[in-house]
Image (tube, rainbow, N blue to C red):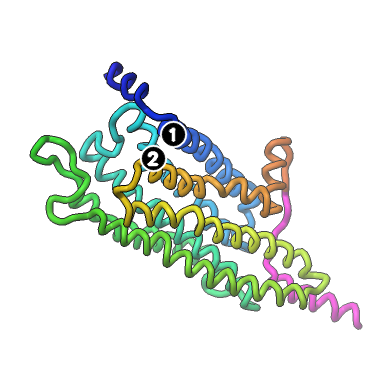
Amino acid sequence: MSNNSTTTTADLSTEVIIVAYYSLVLTIIGTLLNFLTFFILCRSLSRGTRARPTLHYMRTIAIFDILMLYGWNLDHYIYPIYGYYLQTSSISSCKFLSFLNYFAAQSSAWLRVFVSVDRYLSLSRLHRTWFGHSKHVLIIIACIIGVLLLLNFHFFLFACFYDATGKININSSLYQIYPLWDYINLGVYNCAPFILMVIFNTGGIYHLVRLRHTTTVHNHNSHKRHRSISITLVITTFLFLIMTVPATVAFGFFSSANPTILRLLDCILYSYHVSSFPLYMISFNEFRKECIAIITCKRYDRRVEPLIAAVPRLSHAMQRTVH
């Protein structure tokens, strides 16, 4: 086995080796950065989840972005270097990784959709809606996970079997999973989430501009917090389009293309799911301060209060001033 892997590695082109090791680096760095993102969001910043339950979505996204890196992305390194696929090493791993490759990606995308919904409702409604309560956000997250789990559960039941030669076939003996599921994944993972993110982010930006023109002394800081997260969402939506759609389209409709090109497009796709940490550092002010506080071993403790709860106190204080 060692001789085979050495021969195979020696015969690989430079492009294949670069893509393979990039996938490995992506797995290592992506795991560390997403764990760090999750940890930062679980510190004092996350104690404001009652005021800003969006943080529940962001923490869950970090978990699914880690899980994504251990499916096809890791196989892009293992197969060229060691000559086998992790996905086809056993029937159980085949079923689980076939499920995970779609389930984790779709969950990550739809969680991002509901972050956009949450931001839109926060900016467009004067009062907190049902979607804006921390308890209800956890219910929404559980429903997203539950629906997508059921959608992809057929992998556990029907996918992966030993063919006549004794090799593991990742399809089903009852029906043809591929490329059918790649077409479905294009809609569930890319098209529908992207369209919804564009709609709700556009609405959020519109209300953010209106909020800017009606900003009072009190809600100036609230406006800055909304703007920070909204800018992050706009960048996320744009990156989602240019980094994830090409790979999904290529595997769905051009699966017979050059394998190196397909793996390269996949590397770009998985790079998107490693981008949360640098994106938050650049555009999310409170996240950046919390990260710096961790590095410098200090505590960043900023009290977060919902705008709704603060308005009555402001109104009462103004009345006392007038009297």
Question: Label 2: how many residues lie within 10 Å, few (<14), some (14-19) or many (20+)?
Answer: some
Label 1 crowd bin: few (<14), some (14–19), many (20+), radius 10 Å: few
Q: Position of residue 320 (x, y in %)?
A: 87, 78
Image check: 271 left or right of 249?
right
Disc 2 residue type (three-letter) = Thr
**Circle 1/circle 2 CB separation < 8 Å:** yes
Which sits earlier in the primary sequence, circle 1 or circle 2? 1
Span highlighted in magenta in the image: 301-323
| In front of the other: 96 or 199 | 199
Say left or right for 182 vs 226: left
**Looking at the picture, how far across and down is residue 257, in whole percent?**
33, 47
The image shows residue 146, relative to residue 124, as above or below, that is above
Q: Name the residue under label 2.
A: 260
Give coordinates of residue 203: x percent, y percent. Answer: 59, 74
Q: Where is residue 142 in the image (x, y as percent from the top left)?
A: 41, 60
Question: 13 above or below 283?
Answer: above
**Residue drawn at the location 55% of the way across and 66% of the way down:** 116
Query: In this image, 89 relative to 166: left or right?
Result: right
**Above or below — where is 87 with respect to 269?**
above
Q: Which mark is residue 15?
A: 1
Q: Is mark 1 on a helix, strand or loop?
A: helix
Main secondary structure along the magenta-highlighted residues: helix
Amino acid at circle 1: Glu
